[in-house]
Image (cartoon, coloured by chain):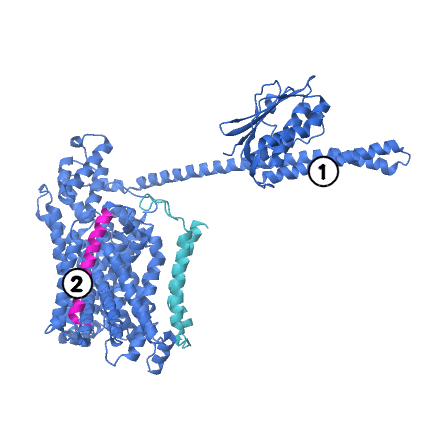
Chain colours: A blue, B cyan
Amino acid sequence: MLSADFVIATAVGYVGLLFVLAYLGDRRARTNAKSFLHSPAVYTLSISVYCTSWTFYGAVGNAARSGLEFLTIYLGPTLVFVGWWFLLRRLVRISHNQRITSVADLLSSRFGKSNRLAVLITCIAVIGIAPYIALQLKAVTSSIQAVAGASAFGRGSLTGIDDVGLAFGVAAGMALFTILFGTRHVDAKEQHHGVVAAIAFEAVVKLTALVAVGVFVVFVGGGFENIFSAAAQAGVTVDAEETFGARWLTTLGLSVAAIVCLPRQFQVTVVENSDENHLRVASWAFPAYMLLMSLFILPIAVFGLTTMPAGSNPDMFALTLPMSFGQDALALFAFIGGFSSATSMIILESIALSIMVSNHIVMPLILRLSPAGRGDGQGVTSLLLMARRFSIVLILSLGFFYFFFTRDSNALAPIGLISFTAIAQFFPSVIAALFWREASLKAATAAIAAGFVFWVWCSFLPSFESVSPQVAMLLDRGPWGISWLRPEAMFGLDNLDPLAHAAFWSILVNVLTLTIGSLLTGQSALERVQASVFVDVFKRGQISRGNFVRGSATANDLFFVAERVLGERRAAALFETEARDSGVDPDMLEPSPEFIGRLERELAGSIGAASAHVMLSKVLSGSDVSLEEMMQMADETQQVIEYSQQLEKTSAELRSTAQQLEDANAQLRELDSQKDEFLSQVSHEVRTPMTSIRSFSEILLDADDIDEGQRQHFVGTIHQESLRLTKLLDEILDLSALERGERTWDNVPVDAEAALGRALTVCEALLRQRGVTVQQGERAPAAVVEGDADRLCQVFINLISNAVKYNDSEAPVMRISSSVKAGKFVVDIADNGPGIAKGERKLIFEKFARGQRGAADQSGAGLGLAISRQIVTRMNGSLDLVQGPLPGACFRVRLAVLK
Amino acid sequence: MDRRKLIGGMLLLTVFGAMLLLPPLVYVFNQPITHFGIPQIVFYLFAVWLLLITGMALLTRALPPDANGSGPGEGER
């Protein structure tokens, strides 16, 4: 049996392991930019922080209570990731370009770097997430209680500690852990590689644990079929009749909004993203992760309902089922899995929220209270860290208080959905920020505020029903007895599910305020600039112009500011790079508008866009952008110029493409004409012998009075011509086979010198007949090359017979020499014939090319050299025309000698 | 395949995937029938889910990667 103390000790040990992982991950990611920590797999796993203890415990409970509804929480995000190209890609690109650090930063940056909006969003997020944190605390507390309650060793050190005390302990531990974890330093991009590594590890742990429990349940239950039929006999059924109603739509919609807008999801998906292409993998891998996670939830729920005693908490089935079967190890693993899912959520959520609080609330306050020029080095950085630690404590306290007040409500999942509804209030503005140019700051602020008010009234307040009689009465009768203001039946809409009711009214009011408000109000100049930067992110690429035009401030002033926020080293590096790029001495640096813009984005990475803007504005006091300058930037003329430049670029690209196409076409035409030429040459070559065969055979057919001698002569001619035809056709076939790359032989080691000798022997009769003097040059010893002896011999015979045939000299001479030089076997066959005219030298290796002098000699088709060259090439050698020792032509064959 | 067509495929997969999960299409498969003791609708929902995952995996594999993720835009659509 597990004891409570042992389980708690395991949990503490596990947290220690996570800490070590985070520490190592941080070091690794810093020293090695190509580390696996920057891989799409780790990215996908870190997104899986979406699956919290709500999934691990709550989904089972939800499935037990309301059937398939739990699936919507995962189907919504699946749709968002399947549609990554249209929303997430845009979000990530914009956030990279603008150094966005949170969802509050995103909206504030888009709507004219308004800090007021950022503050509103931060406050809503902190309040809205409190139930969600409470859910995790409740899950961890319940799981420890479930173990302790079943323990034979009693409650150990938990004796006398109730749920609240336990939850307080968990919250305090988590706060400490998160502070140690996430606030060790301030990163310019707010990326926490170490934390992400730990989160990815936890993602694997929780998935393995839930799957292990699932497999165990399926095994014990005797397969899926048995579990479901046993359940049916016990009267437990998966009720799907009412599933696809208003709640289905609502939870699906809320989960779509949540996966984008939840602070921790925004943090892992957008801010921690190091490469946009990682989204490609996450687009299917994250849905696949969620599918695996949900696969066993229904069997666990159904089996738990069937076998566990009535009144057991279905939220804890994943833990209590293994325990009831005495599987302590599995139960411990399940506990660690649930603990993993809770810790990863709490760590990341409070880091993300603390960044928002420190960047949007604490920083602006400090800026407002402190004089601009105060340069106290590391001051801001340490202040920022302090602010973050403080906000982490605040966030976990809020979660704890929510838990304290609502501890009597049973189920986990409904608590989470309250948070989802709050966070969903950001979604319409996020979509408008990305796609709708006209959306204005005033409208977005009003929309989010109005949606939040409705959420508080319809969703947040009713969750206290069980602890407060006043709230219960309010729900029943409405404020001051005004029944159409009842929180769960606004305007008399009382037959709707409370969740669907709250979501419907808050989102409706939100969207209406946003759209109508944007149409009625105008935008400031900065808003207009930012709107086009956001909406046109893919049209004009990265827009790097600064929002400050005049720079009356000196580099020194700016350096003070940068040093305060970024730390001395980074600030110095930034200024040195700029000085180097503009080619001036660092002391003489004149801050250009572009540089100030870059500096602002750099600062925005640490303290948020609005704060950075305020900060720099103060330094450049008096030189903040004038309205005219701003208008000029957003001027339509400017846009037209940029567009026309873009167009020019595109048309230049088109021109070059067209040129390439034309070239390719010319090549094709050339090839085509060559083919035609080849065909006409072939038919010409075939035609001549055919004509004589036909005419002679016609004479033989028609005339009876031919004497025997003549008949013999005619038949002889026909025979000779058909032999020539056959030879021609053989050669054409041979050549085309060679040209197609077919080889009718295998390259094996052969003695090339011997092949040359054999060729000379074959040609001896011909040489003697023509009276050719053969000069023997130096001869190589036996030389082994890769090739085919017969084919090589064919090449030599061809070259020798050419040297004979085209030689019209009075005293024909042929000179043969061979040698091995530098690993090559070289054969020269030269003659004292007329040689080859300069203009023909290139052509002689072409098909049907014959030397002019040889034209009269009809015995060859002019394919010999072409074939020979092909053969030698296939033996990895070369056949060329070279300057020879004799006045005529000299052909050189070169083949590599085998060692 | 053509880049535009692949992106069109992604849009279709997203929109049609959403339609498959919403009334009224989901009613078509929500019959009181069980296979192997498990309600048909469970099979249907997981099948749609699997279809979305595999469809997206195939589409992203076919789509050529952006040259530079955070660099200048490539002029979309």
When asked about the image quadrant of residue A583, the answer is top left
User: Between residues A457 and A872, which one lies in front from this camera angle?
Assistant: A872
When asked about the image quadrant of residue A311, the answer is bottom left
Establish whether labels 2 and 1 are both on one chain: yes
Q: Specify the segment rendered in magenta.
A: A2-30
When asked about the image quadrant of residue A879, the answer is top right
Q: How crowded is mark 2: few (under 14 residues within 10 Å), some or many (20 or more)?
A: few
Disc 1 marks which amino acid? Thr
The residue at the point 89 percent across, 32 percent down is A707
The residue at the point 29 percent across, 67 percent down is A210
Position of residue A56 relative to residue A25, above or below, is below
Name the residue tied to disc 2. Answer: A12
Residue A513 in view (yes/no):
no
Q: In this view, does A73 lie to the left or right of A600?
A: right
- Give the position of the N terminus of chain A as an image quadrant: bottom left
Residue A411 percent coordinates (x, y): 23, 73
Position of residue A871 relative to residue A28, above or below, is above
